[in-house]
Image: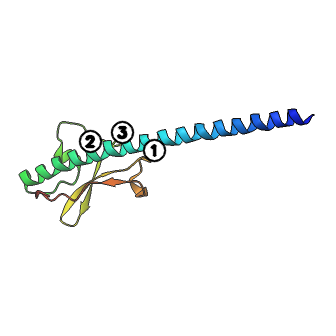
Amino acid sequence: MNKAMRVFIWVVMAITCFDILAWFGKLAGKNVIKAQRERAITERALGKAAATVNAYIRERKRIPRKFSEVIRNGPVPTDAWHNKLRLEKTDGGVRVVSAGPDGDFETDVDNMRSEPQNGSDN
């Protein structure tokens, strides 16, 4: 193989590697944007659910143990990953919790939570 052919092959390989890296960069950027959007959707869902729980506490003068007490005739609110939100007991109240992208409440790493709710206007 002559020198010109080797140079040509190296140039083609370099361009191919650059294209592959650029593609991975675009893919990573899209994943970051998607994750940010999912977190924003979940934060809104947590806020709405927490406000509903807080209104329930003010009206009934008691802290609910689960969403079915708060939302009698509707579905339990969900996060951006279509997982049902859950109530979590706190000192003197409850907070609304999302299991996060992995859908597992037990892994706490990516779970999202509202502020504690106790019937007062926070």
Picture quarter with the C terminus: bottom left
Question: x and y percent of residue 14 in the render?
Answer: 73, 39
Mark 3 or 2 closer to N-term? Answer: 2
Residue type marked 3: His
Mark 1 or 3 closer to N-term? Answer: 1
Image side of residue 38 versus residue 87, left or right: right
Q: Residue furthest front?
A: 4
Query: Do callouts 3 and 2 mark residues in contact (Cβ within 8 Å)?
Result: no
Image mark for residue 78: none
Q: Estimate the spatial distance between the alpha carbons at disc 2 and disc 1, rounded to whole Å.
A: 24 Å
Residue type marked 2: Pro
Image mark for residue 32: 1
The residue lying toward the viewer, choosing from 46 and 1, is 1
Mark 2 or 1 closer to N-term? Answer: 1
Nearer to us of marks 2 and 1 is 1
Write down the quadrant of residue 5 in the picture.
Answer: top right
Residue ID at (53%, 38%):
26
Q: Which residue is mark 3?
A: 82
Image side of residue 21 versus residue 102, left or right: right
Residue type marked 1: Val
Residue ID at (11%, 49%):
55
